[in-house]
Image (cartoon, helix red, strand yellow):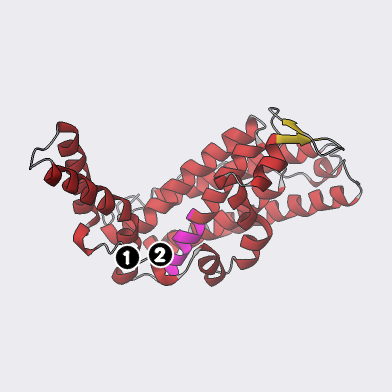
Amino acid sequence: MTAQRTEFPVVERVNVDPAAVAAFSREWDFMILASELLREVTSYVSVAACTLGEAPTWTRDQAAVGGNLVRLTKLLSAYLDQIVQKRFETSMILSRLAFETIVNARYLIANFSPELVNMFVRHSLRHERRLRDTIQANIAERGGEVLHIEQRMLNSIDRAARTAGITLDSVDLRDRTPWGGKDLRRKAEAVGFGEAYLAVFGGMSHNVHGSWHDLYQFHLDVDDAGGFTPKLEWCRPRPQPLFALGHLSLYAVTDFLTFIGGETAIDQFRGQLRDLDERIEYVDKAHESYLSRKTWPAI
C-alpha cells in the first residue's frame, strides 16, 4: 500500500467473551482462543508488511526493515500451523525465530541510519564472502578452469552482493562483532524486551540448536533408575508463548507503520491495535488465574 492507496484492509476482530472465558475448564480452551488472537495479530503484521509508504517501492534501507515484517508474517503463520498440529517442539523453534525478527526490526527502526543498515547487510554476506573466496581458490588451484556449478554459484553470489549494494571485499571475515555492535540479548534490552528475552525466548535457543536440555525436555523419557528411552510423541503446546508473541508483534507493527507511513498510517490502526493488545492481556491474565488453581502435573 502506497500514498496512492490510503484505505487499509479491515481485519476481522476476535471476540473475547468474559463469561465464556470464565467457564473454560481445559487449557486447550485457552489455546484455541490464544491461536485466534495470534491469527488476528498476524493479519495486522501482514498489513504492516505490505505498507510501502510514499513511494511504490522500498529503498534498500527501508527493505532491510520491511523485509523483517514480511519474514515475521511468514514465521507467525508457520508457528500457528505447528500449534494447530499440536507440535510444541517445532513451534518453540519458530517462536524463537519470530522473537529475533521482532527485535531486529525494532532495533533497526530505533537506530535507523545508512551506517547501521550497511552493518546489518554486510554481516549477512559473511557466508557469501567465504564461499566466493573458497571457489576462487579452487579455480586457481585448477589452473583457471571454472566448473559450470562454480560459475552458477559465483553468479548467484554476485547477484546477492549487487542487490545488497555491498562489495564482498568490504566484508571483513576477521571481524566477529555482531551487527550493530550488540548480540541479540543486548539488542532486546535496547528495545525494551530484556525481560521477555530472559523469561521466555532466551531459553528457546536450546530448542533451535538441539542442546541437551532440548533433548531431555522433549525427545527423551527417563526412568527412576536414570535410564533413557526415545520419546517420539509430540508435546502439547502451551498458550503463554502465543500471548507473548502477540504482545511483542504488535509493538513491531506500531513501530513499522509509524516508520514507513508516519502518523497518517498509524492513526488508522492505533485504536484497533490497542484493543487487540488489551484482549490478549485479558485472556493471558485469565489463563494465569486458571493455572493458579492447578497443581503439578496438571499444569
| Residue 65, horizontal then vertical, whole percent | 38, 58
Mark 1 — residue? 174
Q: Position of residue 57 (x, y in %)?
A: 26, 52
Q: Is-magenta flag for residue 189? A: no
Q: For the residue carrying disc 2, how many other residues have a C-alpha within 10 Å: few (<14), some (14-19), or many (20+)?
A: some
Give the camera-side residue of 175 and 263. 175
Q: Nearer the viewer, residue 58 or 272?
A: 58
Q: Amino acid at mark 2?
A: Phe
Residue 164: where, in percent of width, then height? 25, 55
On the image, numbered disc 2 is attached to which residue?
259
Left or right, residue 133 beside residue 257: left
Q: Which residue sits at x=29%, y=69%?
A: 114
The region drawn magenta spans 101-110
Contact (CB < 8 A) between labels 1 and 2? no
Q: Of callouts 1 and 2, which one flags the residue occurring earlier in the amino acid sequence?
A: 1
Q: CA distance from mark 1 to mark 2?
A: 34 Å
Of residues 225 and 248, which is closer to you in this image?
225
Question: At 68% across and 35% down in the image, what residue appears?
Answer: 219
Amino acid type at circle 1 is Arg
Magenta stretch, main secondary structure, is: helix
